[in-house]
Image (tube, grey):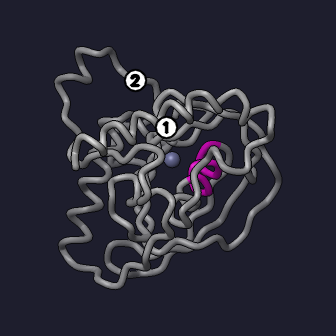
Amino acid sequence: MMAQASPDFKPKPDAATLAAEDPVLELRKYPDPVLMAPAQPVTEFGPALKRLVADMFETMYQERGVGLAAPQVGVSQRILVLNCAEKQPPEGELALINPEIVATEGEQYGDEGCLSFPGMYAKKRRPRKVTMRAQNTEGEWFEVTGEGLLARALVHELDHLNGRVFVQDLELVEFIKLRKELEQMKREWKREHARAR
Ligand SMILES: [Zn+2]
């Protein structure tokens, strides 16, 4: 997710800084089919998982995101990384393996963005407070409760694991605002993949 009001992103740095940084993992953009597929549970808690989680954090920071789900880097597994803290990492880092919602409370309504939809934002209703349980990279279960931005980020990222993206279930007026850009993204994606074949 984006910026302080939204889930996947923080503001991007200038173009020169970005050009100097190659993301560790390739970010998948809408409408890549991996984003629309339900992700598989993680069963192996070995070094490969820890490496993937570390690479996902690095990719998320490079893209100025506050959350990233494994399908967004082409891995259809139930893995999320988040960091909504305004502090120096690793402070605030959360890695959730096989996450599930335990409880939700209240409601918030505000702008949301997604690293797989660069530059696009829409207003979306989300719970104000969310508690999830998940495994850490050792396979141990823990609970995390988030409010505000973290709650929004948690449910946004969990949606990714269920093959859902933030432009689904928008209010009509919000969807209409994004419709042209979504069509444009579909055309670009088709063009790029026609070249690859
Ligand atoms: Zn997203």
Q: Position of residue 60 (x, y in %)?
A: 35, 44
Which quadrant of the figure has residue 159? bottom right
Circle 1 packing at 10 Å, graded few (<14), some (14-19), many (20+), is many
Whether residue 28 is visible here, answered yes or no, is: yes
The three-letter code of the residue at mark 2 reads Lys
Residue range of the region highlighted in magenta in the rendering = 149-156
Tell me if 110 is positioned left or right of 34 in this view: right
Q: Residue at x 33, y 63 (%)?
A: 75
Tell me if 3 is positioned left or right of 49 in this view: right
The three-letter code of the residue at mark 1 reads Phe
| 32 or 19: nearer the viewer | 32
Tell me if 109 is positioned left or right of 98 in this view: right
Q: Residue at x 40, y 23 (%)?
A: 12
| 178 or 92: nearer the viewer | 178
The residue carrying mark 2 is 12
- Residue 152 located within the stretch drawn in magenta: yes
The residue carrying mark 1 is 117
Q: Position of residue 26 (x, y in %)?
A: 26, 46
1 or 2: tag closer to the N-terminus = 2
- Any atom of ligand 1 within 8 Å of the CB at mark 1? yes
Whether residue 94 is visible here, answered yes or no, is: no
Label 1 SS: strand
Q: Residue at x 24, y 49 (%)?
A: 25
Question: Closer to the camera: disc 1 or disc 2?
Answer: 1
User: Which residue occupies the extreme bottom position in the image?
Assistant: 43
- Residue 144 located within the stretch drawn in magenta: no
Label 2 SS: loop
Q: Position of residue 125 (x, y in %)?
A: 76, 45
